[in-house]
Image (cartoon, grey):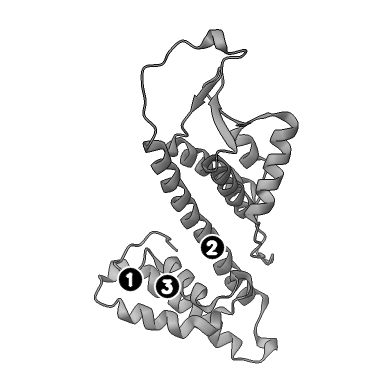
Amino acid sequence: MSLIIETEEFNGPMDLLLNLVEKEKIDIENVDLAKITNKFIEEVENLKNHSTKDLTDFIYLASTLLYIKSKKLLPKNDFDEDDQIDEDLIKQRLIEYKKFKEISKQLIELENISSKHFRKIQEDLSVYQSEKENLIVPDINLLSETLLEILNRVDKRIVIEETEIIEAEEYKIEDCIEDILWKVEKNNKYSFSYFLSKNTNKNEVISVFLALLELLKSNILKVVKNHEDKMEILMR
């Protein structure tokens, strides 16, 4: 199920589903997907002018939602564990998609802030510095690549049993910010990838990444390059 199918209205089926969930003003973990199935199908009908290729993922998700809804209309004994896994998987993907949208927004804001910095020829200020520190404006592409690299590692570590029900856990960015600040205040310096690689859950990795972006954007933390040209995080 692709997350990046663009139409004029929505950037893929997950974007449409997220839009409908947010209109209900319900947390993703608590939303009853069966209740918004009809609305999703109606929206897909409105997209019928698009090519079949573009609509394939929308139709696939619509059929999955319709299947879940039909099973829920049956007696509880007929709604088995596999059906619950299908619903939990969609919620998990929805949480991930929502966070990726937020990451895109934060990266754009950070890039806009970076573009306002005027650059000039570097002066030799080493005589005024007790320790050489190469303060850098965060490289947006490098930040994104670091995130994707960590997420790929997480995917390789996680082995999901067929009978396991996946819970759509939500990791609060505020809690991640507190944890990051506590660590940096205690030990002063960490590599950027350290905070991401310590987590084994994809949603937690994304939440930590968002927390780091927020702290950088707010000028609470700064990014420097060490002698190996790797990014490190310090307090300002």
What is the C-alpha distance between the residues marked 2 and 3? 14 Å
Q: Which residue is mark 2?
A: 93
Kind of residue sitting beneath label 2: Arg
Task: Identify the secondary structure beneath mark 1.
Answer: helix
Q: Position of residue 98 (x, y in %)?
A: 51, 61
Front residue of this view, candidates 33 and 141: 141
Q: Nearer the viewer, mark 2 or mark 3?
A: 2
View extreme (front): residue: 128
The relative height of residue 96 versus residue 123 in the rendered view (above or below) is below
Residue at (42, 41) in percent of width and height:
113
Contact? badges 2 and 1 (CB < 8 Å) = no
Q: Which of marks 1 and 2 precedes in the sequence? A: 1
Pinpoint residue 174: horizontal percent, then vertical percent.
Answer: 65, 53
Residue under the point 45% across and 66% down: 14
Q: Residue at x 69, y 52 (%)?
A: 175
Quarter of the figure that contains the C terminus: top right
In this rendering, the answer to whether 33 lies above or below 171 is: below
| 27 vs 88, nearest the viewer | 27
Q: 208 left or right of 13?
A: right
Mark 2 is surrounded, within 10 Å at the Cα level, by few (under 14), some (14 to 19) or many (20 or more) other residues, namely some
Q: Is residue 102 left or right of residue 191?
A: left
In the picture as drawn, the residue positioned furthest to the top comes out as 127
Please give the count of numbered marks on the rendered protein: 3
Instruction: Count neighbours of disc 3 (C-alpha within 10 A) and say few if under 14, some if 14 to 19, many if 20 or more.
Output: few
Identify the residue shown where x is 57% and y is 68%: 91
Query: Cα distance, mark 2 to mark 1?
Result: 19 Å
Q: Quadrant of the N terminus?
A: bottom left
Which residue type carries mark 3? Tyr
Residue 55 bears which disc, if any? 1
Residue under pointer 3: 60
Q: Is residue 71 left or right of residue 20?
A: right
The percent coordinates of residue 157 (x first, y second) are: 64, 46
